[in-house]
Image (cartoon, rainbow, N blue to C red):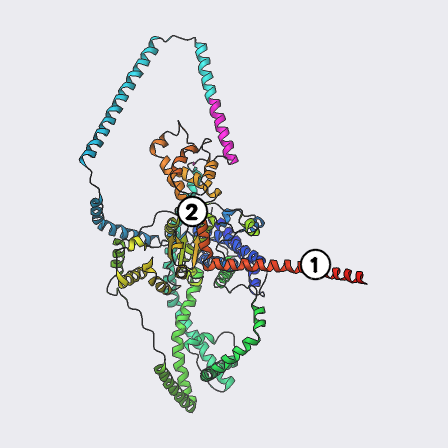
Amino acid sequence: MSQSSYGRMWDAAQGALEYLLEDEYPTMQLRPQKDRLQVFQTLATFYLRYLKIFRALEEVYDQLVHPQKRRVVHQVLEGVMGRLVELKNEMVELEHSEFHYFDDILQDFKMTPEDLEVPIPRYFVREKMRALKEREKMLAHILAKGGCQEHKTVSVLVQSMSMERAVWLLQVSERARQGRLRAHFMKTIRQEEQRRLQGSSSSMLDPDRAATCIQKVWRGFRDRRRVKKDCLEEMIFLGMIPAQQLTPCPAQLHAQQVESRRHGVQEEHEAEYQRALVNIKESVRSVDGPDIKESLQEQIRQWFIECRDATGKFPDFPSPEDGGSASLFAQKTPEQVAAEFAAKEEEREKKKKSKEDKDKKGKKKEKKGKMKGKKGKGDTEEEEKGWKMTPSNFLPTVVEGAKLYKEVWHNRDEKQNFLQSFDAQLVREEKRLEVEEELRVQVDELMRQELKNLKLVVDRDKGKKKKKVKKSSKKKKKKGRKTGKKKKKKEKDLTADRTTESLYEELVLEGFIIRPMNVKLSDYIGEYSYLGTTLRQADIEPMPSLSDVRQLIALYGILPLGSQCVHERGPLIRALLLTGPAGVGKKMLVHALCNETGANLFDLSPAKLAGKYPGKSGLQYLLHMVFKMEPKRLKKNLPKVLKSIKPEDRVLVVGTTRKPFDADIKPFCKVYKKIILIPRPDYASRFTLWKELLQAGGAQLGPKLDLSSLAKVTDGYTQGHILQAIQTVLNSHRLNQQTKRPLTAVEFIPPLARQDPVYKEEEEAFKAWYSRTPLGKKRTRAARASEEAADLKKGKTKGGKLQKKGKEGKNKKRKKKK
């Protein structure tokens, strides 16, 4: 795609965003809504629309080369990312569940389940590639330094072998070697004998008959090959056999090269833009600076004269906190400006007086408030019922970016800017404003002194009184400082005398900083669940799919860690727990999270902590080192450390466990506010797993390999079980025999039978444990409340019928008596 194509994509995304904002803003001003299903439909619709815009903007930001356009796209992109996280949080609070299903809404929007995948912005890693490479070099250097020690420890652990066993192994190897030589010798003898017999009995055939025989053999081979190819294409088209991995065509290779080349052009244009920012600012300061300074002074002097003529006295110059002279020229008359300053002074005096009155009247107000609360409790409850959209921290950012696009870039003619370099005119306008603000500070200081001199000359008496008032206020301020509260003591820096490099080296050598595996979130294979909405409508809580797990990892982990804006202003998630049976990919998700964001991976598992940094002080020292760089032993200290994590600190604690029910649930849930229960794969995910993992292992998928049967048979097995079975079967010897002996499904049954699947009891134990978590309890209570409400409705209708029947019976009895 060309730059104009990405420009049109940006235009379409901004148009869709404008329509979305028009629909979303009215919902934030509506009264609380009571229909939970309607509210969820609204939130889910907004979520899907934002997700579609997010995907388009991410593509545009990755491929645009214009530096100023990319800044506008980046601003809107981060706002959309944050809004996605906010909407997800709203849906969780509404439904009391981490997993949501959009089957019916996908049909309305004509979207596929693939459109639900949260895209991972490529700039998370690409824009800090240099820092990541330097960190990788440092890590490799430290590991190489400690490699000798590791080698020594491994050599000590090697078990010694007895003399008898060594001799036996040598004898077996030698006999096998002699047997292979003998077999090869006998094979050559048989081949020579066959050649000799064929040569002696050979007879010349008729040329026509020989040609017919050759034609018959060739035509049969050609037709069999054509039929086999057509049959294979038909099966692939019907989806009965997965398509084989093919090498990309030249057009695809060219497109990949063009995309990678654009990244280089982006870096060049960005470097030019940064240089232009400095150079243009210097030229504006040197050329236009004196004129700007002089015009500012003339404007302020004119304001002095106008205020003097209108009010009969010189005004007070606004302080830097009030904006200085910039607040004077906001299209206001001198009388309005003087009135505003007088009102501000009155407000300050009132605030000082009200502070003293508040302390005295505070207790009385509390008592009155309690009494009022008892009386008007029913009214407030009725007003608070229902759901209302919480204010967003990201919508102002999105609106500002959309406004900037519409005003500057929507109708801008860029036919002459074919290379898409920076716009010098916009840079000059921007830097002129910056220079004006800088010079305004200097001019304000000069004009304050000039105003002071004018007041001294014209209003000497008034000036003296004002000075006395100022002195008394200073004394009051000083007294206030003395009687103020004491500042909190800062925490001690346990490693103040050490450099960051030395701390990093110690953590690497001790095994706490590790290199993450080279996996991405897309490598976590799993399909979408198509029955989620149907099961929930039948009051059956479905097990989440692996596709839902991928979405949660992206929303709760990757987006906040990758974007400083999303982490600071979005819902703060300090700790995340991944739990589920063994082999479902918990650790793989942690490594993918670090790879997608370029984050450091600290391994604080019990195996790494055993025997290191003993005692309470040692543990505090270790946690201090970990958080300075970025089991029971952590039970008391970890919650305290988590509280110290602020929104601006991009730190995420991720726990993994396959036995959460062995821990105390209350302290456990205090640490991990977000818990993701990862289930075993369903049929669709197992089918995809078999197909993808077999192809990755080098298997040739043919008609004899029944993947559907394998997916059905492996119900209850996890991804780890399937991977282990594939690795057992697909050794080098078996891979070489595929052309003669194609793979069959039966070959994978023995290695699967030697493994224990996830039994129903274990799955029920996970469900029961999750129902005792805070979110699980809320969902259980909500389900009970809805059932009780439904029963009440049924009871009312039945009761009404019974009462009518009772009245009719009484009337009949009275008639009989008469």
Q: Residue at x 56, y 68 (%)?
A: 384
Left or right side of 592 for 97: right
* Image location (x, y in percent) of residue 547: 47, 48
Q: Name the residue that disc number 1 marks.
A: 801
* Image location (x, y in percent) of residue 355: 45, 82
74 drawn magenta: no
* Image location (x, y in percent) of residue 111: 54, 48
Residue furthest front in the image: 817
Residues 733 and 242: in front is 733
Residue 138: mark in rendering = none
Label 1, residues with CA under 10 Å away: few <14, some 14-19, many ≥20: few
> Which label sits in the foreground, 1 or 2?
1
Is residue 119 visible to us here?
no
SS majority, magenta:
helix
Residue 522: mark in rendering = 2
235 drawn magenta: yes
The three-letter code of the residue at mark 1 reads Lys
Residues 218 and 185: in front is 185
* Looking at the image, residue 422 lies above or below residue 475: above
Q: Magenta residues?
A: 222-246
